[in-house]
Image (tube, rainbow, N blue to C red):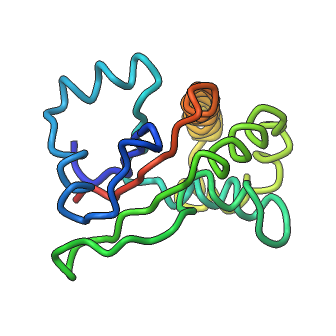
Amino acid sequence: MSMYFHFRAIPPAALRNSPAWLEKLFEDGWDAVRERIGRHREEVLDGGYLDHEHLYADALPGEGPHTQVVLGGRRIPHRDPSSPPFQLLTAAQTNRVAAYLATADFEALWRNARADLLKPYEGQDAEPEVRGAFAAAHRDLTAFYGQTAQYGDAVVKWLVL
């Protein structure tokens, strides 16, 4: 797997504000990550994560949980300044994102972002496949945030290069 955006659920009492500690959260091999994804304790978006951000952040004007689904959160710099920062959503923010996703209408989100999301595929009949990929990611993110909020956990995110 190449570049991807990684989400990890963490109990608030276990959180550390240390870049070294946060980096260790993302050191596991792909098999361990895949197991946690199956339990909705972790989620990943492939290199198209910015497109997923567009699906949510452009849905409504202004700030709110819709802007925190993918890229939102307090930035914590990585030890290596050339690496992307970590992003942290508190348990309360995670709960708001989960509530937003639980009520979000994927069809409305898709209609709003459709033209922009299909631009890279212009001239191709790719809409069913592209829409299906976004719908699947939406379901996965909804399940991840819902389970995480149910446990009262926070979310740490990092772009893995």
100 and 79: which one is in front?
79
Q: Quadrant of the C terminus?
A: bottom left
Visible residue check, residue 34:
yes
- Quadrant of res 59: bottom right
Q: Among all residues in the image, which is located at the extreme bottom?
A: 81
Which quadrant of the structure image shows residue 51? bottom right
Figure quadrant of the N terminus: top left
Residue at 69 percent of width and 38 percent of height: 98
Residue 76 screen position, x and y as percent: 37, 71
Q: Nearer the viewer, residue 70 or 128?
A: 70
In the picture, measured across the screen, residue 15 lies left or right of residue 1, that is right
Q: Nearer the viewer, residue 79 or 37?
A: 79
Rendered view: 37 above or below 59: above
Query: Residue drawn 20% across and 80% down?
Result: 82
Residue at 48% x, 46% y: name it.
Answer: 155
Q: Is residue 113 above or below residue 144?
A: below
Left or right placement of residue 131 versus residue 19 in this view? right
Above or below 95: residue 2? below
Where residue 19 sits: x, y (%)? 24, 65
Residue 125 in the image, given as x and y percentages of width and height? 60, 40
Residue 9, image x, y percentages:
44, 37
